[in-house]
Image: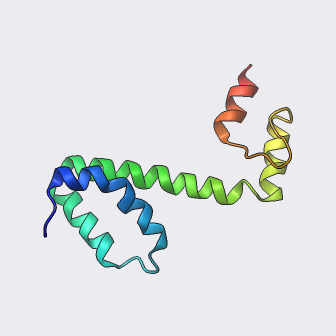
């Protein structure tokens, strides 16, 4: 069964999230998404931004628990850092601008 572009667009976020569980860069899911993105500009645009956002999110989630990240965040704005609480860049920028 082939899904339409509108159906794929609805489930694109879930497909992109499933990519983090893929062991290899060359897999059927990636090939499928790239082929559909090439054939449909709307899907390609959405895929680009989802990949960009999720890769940044995964990076931030992996870094926020390290002591080095906490030290860097504390040096920029000590009032933002609460031990054990997640620190996000937009919190630092918002609080340091005030």
Quadrant of the drawing holding the C terminus: top right
Compared to 80, does 39 lie above or below?
below
Q: Quadrant of residue 88?
A: top right
| x and y percentages locating residue 29 in the rendered image | 31, 72
Q: Which residue lies at the image location 21% right of the left edge and 66% below the top edge? A: 35
Up the image or down, 31 lies above or below 78; here it is below
Q: Which residue is drawn at 32% across and 70% down?
A: 30
Residue at (84%, 49%) from the top-left corner? 71
| Picture quadrant where residue 59 is located | bottom right
- Residue 5, how many percent across, how many down? 16, 54
Which residue lies most toward the top here? 98
- The colour style of the image is rainbow
Q: In this view, does 76 lie above or below 60?
A: above
Q: Look at the image and tell me in which quarter the N terminus lies.
A: bottom left
The total number of labels drawn is: 0
Instruction: Tell me: 1 left or right of 87.
Output: left
Q: Residue at x 18, y 49 (%)?
A: 6
Q: Is residue 82 left or right of residue 63?
A: right
Residue 57, percent from left and from top: 56, 52
Q: Position of residue 93 (x, y in %)?
A: 68, 31
């Amino acid at each position: 069964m082939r899904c339409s572009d509108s159906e794929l667009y609805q489930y694109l976020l879930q497909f992109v999230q499933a990519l983090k569980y893929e062991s290899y860069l060359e897999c059927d899911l990636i090939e499928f998404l790239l082929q559909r993105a090439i054939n449909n500009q709307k899907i390609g645009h959405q895929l680009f931004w989802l990949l960009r956002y999720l890769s940044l999110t995964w990076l931030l989630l992996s870094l926020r628990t390290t002591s080095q990240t906490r030290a860097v965040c504390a040096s920029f704005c000590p009032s933002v850092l609460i031990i054990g609480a997640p620190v996000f860049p937009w919190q630092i920028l918002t609080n340091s601008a005030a």
